[in-house]
């Protein structure tokens, strides 16, 4: 489970910093999810592929919504790359090390740990007045709820209409909308938490693994993959049961990709493998550069970012079908040429998931 430090903000600059942490966190989930997704060959493990693809697309929308919130309160989003293996931005839960795993039980378990709510299946009711604590260690969902509470306290003068906003009309189809006032920000946060953790307990409701669109939340989709079973409604105290349907997963039907390619020494690998990695790095760097511009007053750059995403996918396919000396392959390392890393997330050469 990811745990974040929440500190009661003293100024609008503190609030902007907290929203930037949300931006960093959402963007940092993309490489581990995409690495698992890309390592599934075409035509294999389709049910698992669909689930990870949908999660990844929603995480991109979550990052965009967080950027919209930050722009709406006068901030300037910074899009920087995480490093893997490493900790996700802001995580203090005993040093959980996140890896780039190919599609595997380990990748599914890691996704569950990242997305895990405080109480799966039947989430607890949200605490009232939770933002009154000066400092607390909280889950991702709790962090967002405290952020929502804090944003509600901002005066109208701190909100800026139509400032550098991105919405569904600009390539990223889905539940992406402009944030111009607190009500918009609250809706964005509710959507983010719901899609990640499900519907929390509220009033007489016992909570649900379904999000606001009546789709399975991220945590439970990863759980379905790990168990190779479909979570279905049932007439029992929890309201759900496992199966009888399965996802038909074949853990062997995956490219033989190495884990954590950033730590791999490619200097003695075949030139074709080195070139494929370079193409991945170039496309990834171009995507980040374009996103940075798109969320800081140049919305036309979002189209450039989408093109770079396509280039990254094509380069990843090449990398995943180009053998290394030992017969394995390496997916994209999600390395940015020349730097531009998330400062709070130091790379870790070795380590086990805590």
Image: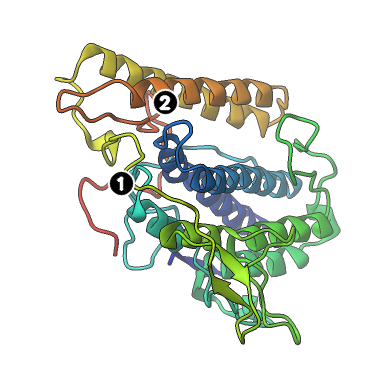
* Percent of width and height locating residue 214: 73, 61
Q: Earlier in the sequence, mark 1 or mark 2?
A: 1
Q: Which mark is residue 77?
A: none
Q: Quadrant of residue 148?
A: bottom right
Q: Position of residue 307 (x, y in %)?
A: 60, 20
Q: Callout 1: few (<14), some (14-19), or many (20+) C-alpha neighbours within 10 Å?
A: many
Q: Residue at x 67, y 70 (%)?
A: 199
Residue 312 visible here: yes
Give the structural element (helix, strand or loop) at label 2: helix
Query: Residue 97: x percent and y percent?
Result: 32, 55
- What distance separates the C-alpha of mark 1 from that of mark 2? 19 Å
Location of the C terminus (image quadrant): bottom left
- Residue at 47% across / 31% down in the picture? 42
Residue that mark 1 sits on = 85
Quick one: 93 or 343, which is closer to the camera? 93
Q: Nearer the viewer, residue 193 or 328?
A: 328
Tag 2 residue: 316
Q: How is the image coloured?
A: rainbow
Q: Secondary structure at mark 1?
A: loop
Q: Is residue 236 above or below residue 120?
A: below
Q: Quadrant of residue 333?
A: top left
């Amino acid at each position: 489970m990811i745990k974040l430090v929440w500190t009661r903000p003293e100024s609008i600059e503190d609030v902007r910093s907290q929203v930037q942490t949300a931006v960093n966190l959402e963007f940092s989930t993309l490489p581990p999810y995409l690495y698992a997704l890309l390592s599934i060959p075409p035509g294999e493990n389709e049910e698992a592929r669909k689930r990870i693809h949908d999660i990844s697309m929603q995480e991109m929308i979550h990052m965009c919504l967080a950027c919209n919130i930050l722009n709406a309160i006068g901030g300037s989003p910074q899009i920087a790359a995480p490093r893997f293996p490493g900790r996700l931005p802001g995580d203090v839960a005993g040093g959980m090390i996140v890896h780039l795993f190919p599609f595997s039980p380990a990748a599914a378990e890691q996704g569950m740990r990242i997305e895990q709510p405080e109480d799966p299946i039947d989430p607890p009711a949200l605490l009232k007045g939770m933002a009154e604590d000066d400092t607390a260690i909280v889950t991702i969902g709790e962090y967002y709820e405290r952020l929502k509470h804090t944003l509600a306290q901002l005066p109208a003068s701190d909100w800026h209409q139509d400032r550098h906003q991105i919405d569904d009309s600009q390539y990223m189809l889905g539940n992406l909308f402009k944030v111009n006032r607190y009500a918009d920000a609250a809706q964005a946060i509710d959507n983010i938490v719901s899609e990640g953790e499900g519907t929390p307990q509220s009033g007489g409701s016992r909570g649900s693994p379904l999000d606001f669109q009546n789709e399975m939340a991220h945590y439970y989709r990863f759980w379905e993959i790990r168990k190779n079973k479909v979570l279905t409604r049932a007439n029992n105290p929890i309201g759900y049961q496992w199966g009888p349907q399965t996802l038909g997963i074949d853990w062997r039907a995956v490219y033989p990709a190495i884990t954590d390619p950033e730590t791999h020494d490619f200097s003695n690998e075949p030139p074709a493998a080195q070139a494929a990695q370079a193409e991945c790095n170039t496309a990834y760097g171009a995507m980040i550069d374009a996103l940075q511009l798109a969320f800081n007053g140049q919305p036309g750059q979002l189209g450039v970012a989408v093109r770079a995403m396509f280039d990254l996918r094509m380069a990843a396919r090449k990398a995943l079908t180009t053998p290394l000396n030992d017969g394995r392959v390496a997916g994209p390392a999600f390395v940015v040429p020349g730097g531009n890393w998330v400062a709070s997330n130091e790379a870790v050469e070795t380590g086990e998931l805590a």
